[in-house]
Image (spheres, rainbow, N blue to C red):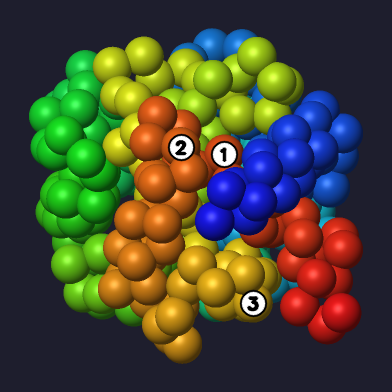
Amino acid sequence: MHELKDFLDEKALCYEHPKFIETDPVQIPHLFTQKEDIEISGFLTATISWGNRKSILNNAHKLMLLLDNSPHDFIMNHTKNDLKNMESFVHRTFNGEDLVYFIKALRNFYLKYASMEAFYTQFKTETHLQNAIHHFKKEFFNYPHEIRTEKHISDPRKNSAAKRINMFLRWMIRDARKGVDLGIWKHLSPSQLSCPLDVHSGNVARKLGILSRKQNDGKAVKELDSQLRKFDPVDPVKYDYALFGLGVFEKFTTL
């Protein structure tokens, strides 16, 4: 197990590098400097981060243009005519109707709470943020909406891996010194993060023997988190870089 930790430490160092953002959706929040702009752009980008990576990046950049490259100002001060421009947006099953609701819900959220970070801090536990994700989804959809729109935010309490929102939380919370994650939320700890489990990281974890569950679901996240915390209880999700890099860039599972 010590050799495996050394191997994963090495790969995490290799892939947590500024060049990583050149092909990754995390580049979108890096476009901004204001806290609210970073977290709104990050949240919306993470929401559409599934499928072809090139398509994700293209549509995330289009989304920022629709928000006048000033996400927080747009969210808080948009008009009905502004929202009409959103109706043509589409990324896979996330469409203009969903986007319009997200914009309205974000405005209501910022009017009600001091910050997104403050909300998550309120519902954190000592060891994880999965409970906070559940409450965030509940609050976010606390306004009239189409039921189909709810599928765009996952709920760990329903045994979802919640990959995209766990990725968003990694962006917001992990230290920014290595140039990838942004580290703008200071009241939450990297030790509370869960791995953004997807097909790549899941398959690599299984090949390495640190994940036995076959489904990429909430139970798998809990199992993988438990293993990664043994390697580094302070910053377990740094290994997301290792698992993802091995799967996407090194095709580790096909070797």
115, above or below 156, in the image = above
- Of badges 1 and 3, the one in the foreground is 3
Marks 1 and 2 in Cβ contact (< 8 Å): yes
In the image, is residue 88 above or below residue 131?
Answer: below
Q: Nearer the viewer, mark 1 or mark 2?
A: 2
Observer able to see residue 217: yes
- Quarter holding the N terminus is bottom right
Tag 3: Cα neighbours inside 10 Å, few (<14), some, or many (≥20)?
some
Q: Could you say which is closer to the camera, residue 26 or residue 44?
A: 26
Q: Residue, x 41% and y 57% (percent of image)?
A: 227
Looking at the image, can residue 68 be seen? no
Residue linked to disc 3? 207
Residue under numbered circle 1: 238
174 on left or right of 162: right
**Residue drawn 71% across and 49% down?**
7
Q: Is residue 126 above or below residue 134?
A: above
Q: Residue 204 location, x and y as percent?
A: 65, 70
SS of the residue under disc 3: helix
Direction from residue 204 to residue 105 in the image, left or right: left
Could you give the CA–CA distance between mark 1 and mark 2, rounded to whole angstroms?
9 Å
> Which corner quadrant of the image does residue 180 belong to?
top right
Q: Position of residue 254 (x, y in %)?
A: 83, 82
Labels 1 and 3 touching (C-beta < 8 A): no
What residue sits right under mark 2 in the picture?
232
Left or right: 112 in relation to 92: left
As helix, strand or loop, the secondary structure at mark 1 comes to helix
Circle 2: residue type: Asp
Q: Residues within 10 Å of mark 1 (few under 14, many from 20)?
A: many
